[in-house]
């Protein structure tokens, strides 16, 4: 693992923009939606972005394995030996893509020793790009030719801003968030929820129910390098590729790490 994550950050941003071009080519026309075995949708845009990213990462880092939503994952017996690999969602928020609301992203992460050490999140419709590498901080580029601006989370104070899923809201989440007291809520699709926290425009995102490791890894690096965290409901930082399953535990993404969000939300007597 001689190459540092930071050395790959700019090339990965370029690959993400190339994937976005492939996505937008499909977005501009009529497209078919197919349901996978788990009933999640997939389109030609998902598959086109997958090809671009897979080919680009292979050229950039030959021999570094890849896990992606749109590719068959290696068996656990093989994966458990990996110390470094790419973790990719070529089109995060396919439901939002199908709705044509623009709230979908390209997510590319590099995992080292179970931690997300490089993350790129790109919004194809707007060109908004968020990127980070371990120890280098996080930045945002609002347009392809625009300046790179450092982003930071904010300290929680006054009325909390809570972001949540446009496609996966539920009564249990609302009940737990009620424990925070007065707050305002707004919904977004895909990993954009992490990004608005990273740039200081929201305080917390509580996600109950299933997500996959490729849904969170890239945005977790961005959020952590901006000063925030992604924690399970016991308050432990997320780690990747630690077991056979690629399904995440339920989690809290937060900006102000001085607050014990898990204690604020979860009742230790009943685990909710």
Image: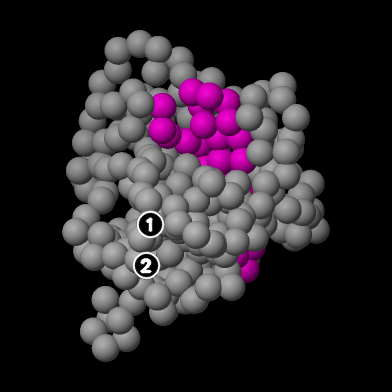
For label 1, the residue is: 183
For label 2, the residue is: 180
Which residue is located at x 33 percent, y 77 percent?
266
Which residue is located at x 22 percent, y 55 percent?
170
Q: Position of residue 218 (x, y in %)?
A: 55, 50
Of helix, strand and loop, which one carries label 2? Answer: helix
Which residue is located at x 42 percent, y 34 percent?
104
Which residue is located at x 33 percent, y 23 percent?
100
Q: Tell which of 4 and 244 is nearer to you.
A: 4
Q: Is residue 26 rendered to the left or right of residue 62?
A: left
Of helix, strand and loop, which one carries label 1? Answer: strand
Contact (CB < 8 A) between labels 2 and 1?
A: yes
For marks 2 and 1, give the CA distance.
7 Å
Q: Residues within 10 Å of mark 1 (few under 14, many from 20)?
A: some
Q: Which residues are magenta?
A: 102-130
Residue 97 in view here:
yes
Judge whether residue 54 is colored magenta.
no
Q: Position of residue 119 (x, y in %)?
A: 61, 48
Considering the image in quadrants, where does the C terminus appear?
Answer: bottom left
Q: Main secondary structure of the magenta part?
A: strand
- Residue 134, quarter of picture: bottom right
């Amino acid at each position: 693992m001689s190459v540092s994550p930071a050395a790959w950050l700019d090339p990965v941003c370029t690959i993400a923009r190339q994937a976005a071009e492939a996505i937008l080519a499909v977005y501009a026309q009529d497209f078919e939606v197919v349901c996978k075995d788990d009933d999640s949708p997939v389109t030609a845009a998902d598959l086109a972005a997958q090809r671009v990213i897979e080919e680009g990462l292979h050229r950039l880092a030959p021999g570094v394995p890849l896990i992606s939503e749109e590719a068959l994952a290696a068996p656990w017996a093989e994966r458990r030996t990996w110390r470094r690999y790419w973790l990719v969602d070529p089109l995060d928020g396919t439901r939002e893509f199908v709705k044509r609301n623009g709230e979908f992203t390209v997510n590319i992460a590099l995992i080292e020793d179970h931690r997300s050490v490089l993350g790129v999140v790109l919004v194809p419709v707007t060109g908004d790009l968020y990127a980070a590498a371990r120890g280098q901080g996080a930045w945002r580029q609002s347009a392809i030719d625009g300046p790179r601006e450092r982003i930071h989370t904010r300290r929680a104070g006054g009325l909390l801003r809570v972001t949540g899923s446009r496609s996966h809201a539920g009564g249990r989440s609302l009940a737990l968030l009620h424990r925070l007291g007065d707050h305002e809520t707004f919904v977004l699709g895909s990993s954009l929820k992490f990004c608005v926290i990273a740039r200081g425009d929201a305080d917390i995102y509580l996600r109950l129910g299933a997500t996959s490791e490729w849904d969170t890894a890239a945005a977790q690096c961005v959020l952590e390098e901006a000063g925030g965290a992604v924690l399970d409901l016991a308050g432990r930082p997320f780690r990747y590729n630690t077991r056979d399953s690629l399904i995440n535990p339920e989690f809290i993404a937060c900006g102000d790490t001085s607050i014990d969000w898990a204690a604020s939300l979860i009742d230790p007597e009943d685990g909710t």
